[in-house]
Amino acid sequence: MTRIRSRRRSPSSLLARANLVLGISATAIALTSIIALAVFVILPIEDRSADDEAGLIVLSAKTWVELDAARRPAFEIEMLQNHDLIVSGETRDLPYVEVGNRYYDLLASKLSERIDGPVRLMASDDLLWANVPMGGYVMQVGISPQRQDIEPVYVGFAIVLFGAVIVPITSGFIVRRVAQPLTRAAQAVEAFRGTEGFQPLPEEGPEELVTLAASFNAMARNVTDLLSNRTTLLAGISHDLRTPLTRMRFALEMLPASVDEKLVERFERNLAAMEELIADALRFSRGAGEAPSQVEFRDYLKTVLRDVDEDLDIEWRNTPPQLVEIATGAFQRVVANLVRNAQQHGRGARLAVDHDGDLVVQVIDDGPGIPPEDRERVFRPFFRLEGSRSRATGGSGLGLAIVAQLCEAHGWRVRLRSSHSGGTIAEVTVPLAGNADATQERNKMTRSRAAREIKP
C-alpha cells in the first residue's frame, strides 16, 4: 500500500514531471540570485556607502572648524558643488526621520562610531541632516538621501556562475529522463521494416512514453501481420493464376487455322503481359521475406550482371569489403530491374560501386532523364512518364515499384538523381552490418555523396 500511495503522489505525466523539474530549477536559481544580490551587492554597498558618507561628514565638519572664518564660505561652496554636501555652523530644529530605514539607521550608526556619541538623522528640504559636534561647535550637515552610480557587478557574476551550474544539471536530468526513451523510439521506428523479428520498445517511464511505446508495439505487430498476409496472399493468387493462364495458352494453341492470326497474336501478347505481372508478383513475394546471407560481393555482383547483360562493365570507385551480408535474391532483383529499366528507357546502362561506410551501387544511363518532381512518383505501380516512358517499350509497369518495395523491406535506400550527361543515376545504398556507426552516419554520408561530383 505504501508503494502504491507513493506512486500516486508523484506526477506520472511527462508534462508534470518536466514542469516540476523546471520549477525546482527556476526556484533554485531565483533563490541563488537573491542570496547573491544580498550578500555580494546590497549589504557590502550599503555598509561601504554609509561608512564613506559618515567619514565625509565628519571630515567636512572638522575641516570647517579648523578653517579661518574668512575661508569657511568658500569651503562650504566647494563642498556643495563637488560633494552635494551642505555644511553650516547654524543649527535648526528639524524633524527626525522615522526609524526603520536600514540605510539611515546604518548611516547614523557609522556617525555615532566616528564621533563617539549618539546621532539621529533629520529630514528637511529633501535632504538628510545630522548634527555633528566638533571642536566646540555643533555643525549641521545636509546630505542627499540617495546614492547613485551603484553597479551590481557581483550579482551578475553570481547569477552567471550559479546559473551555469544549476541549469546544466537540471537539463541533463531532463535529457536522461525524456530524450533517451524518445531516441530509442526514433531508432525503432527507423529500423522497423514490417518484417518479423522486430524488437518491441520497453513500455516503461512517464505516462506519455508508456502510451507511445505500447502504441508503436501494437502498430508494428499489426503492420507486420498485414504485410505478411499481403505477401502470402499475393504469392498464392499469383501462383494460382498460372494454372488458368496455362489452360488459356493451351486453348489458344488448339484454335483452328481459320482463326484470324492478328487476333491470336493479340491474345498471345495479353497472356504474355499477364504472365509477366504474375512473375513480378512472385519475385517480390519471395524477395520481401528473404533472410540475408554472407557472400563475396565482387563475385556475386558479377554473377548478377552476367544474368542480365554480359557486356555490362562495373566501375569500382572504392573497394567494398570482401564479405557482405545481404539478401542475395532481393538485391539481384533490384539491380536487374534497374539495369533493364535503364536499358529500355535510358539508351544503355553503366554500373558503378562506391564504398563510404555504406555500400552504394549506381546504375547510370544516358537517357532523357527524369524530372525532379517525378522522381518519387516513378516508384509507384504502373506510373509512366510521358515521352521518356512509353507503353511501346514493354514492361509490366511494376519494375521500379518492386525495387522500392524490396529496398524498404530490407532497409536499403534507393533514390534517383541526374547525371552529368543529363541522364539518370539510380543509386541503391546498403548499410553494412559490420559498420557500427552506419545507421547514425547514414544521413550524413548521403548528404556528403549528394554534394560531391560523381562522373558518370
Image: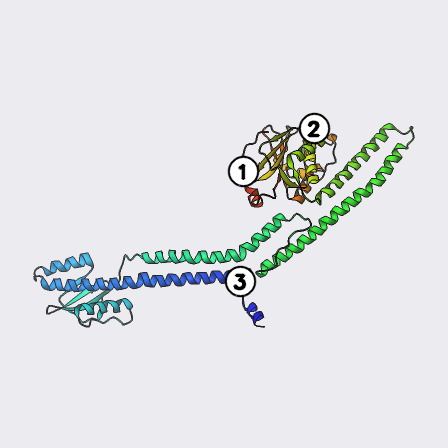
Mark 2 or mark 1, earlier in chain: 2
Instruction: Read off the residue under disc 1.
Output: 448
- x then y, percent, for residue 138: 13, 69
On screen, residue 323 above or below 216 = above
Q: As rendered, which of 172 and 289 lies closer to the eye? A: 289
Q: Which amino acid lies under the numbered mark 1 shown in the image of this protein?
A: Ser
Q: Residue, x 27% and y 66% (percent of image)?
A: 103
Mark 3 lies on residue = 16
Q: Which residue is mark 2?
A: 310
Provide residue 313's location: percent of width, then percent of height: 65, 28
Type of amino acid under label 2: Glu
In the image, 291: left or right of 111? Answer: right
Q: Amino acid at mark 3?
A: Ala
Q: Quadrant of the N terminus?
A: bottom right
Image location (x, y in percent) of residue 101: 29, 69
Residue 46 at x, y percent in the picture:
27, 63
**Secondary-structure class at tag 1:** helix
Give me the C-alpha separation between circle 2 and circle 1.
32 Å
* Residue 112 shown left or right of residue 170 in the figure: left
Answer yes or no: do the residues labelled 2 and 1 have beta carbons within 8 Å?
A: no
Query: For this view, does 169 lie left or right of residue 131?
Result: right
Circle 1 packing at 10 Å, graded few (<14), some (14-19), many (20+), is: few
Q: Tell me if residue 46 comes above or below residue 279 in the rendering.
A: below
Q: In the picture shown, does residue 353 fall above or below 218?
A: above
Secondary element under disc 2, as helix, strand or loop, is loop
Depth check, mark 3 against mark 2: the one in front is 2
Out of 192 and 267, give the one closest to the viewer: 192
For marks 3 and 1 on the same chain, the one whose residue lies earlier in the sequence: 3
**In this rendering, which labeled residue sits more in front, label 2 or label 1?**
2
Residue 450 visible from this viewpoint: yes
Q: Looking at the image, can residue 380 be seen?
A: no
Query: Which of the pair 344/204 is nearer the observer?
Result: 204
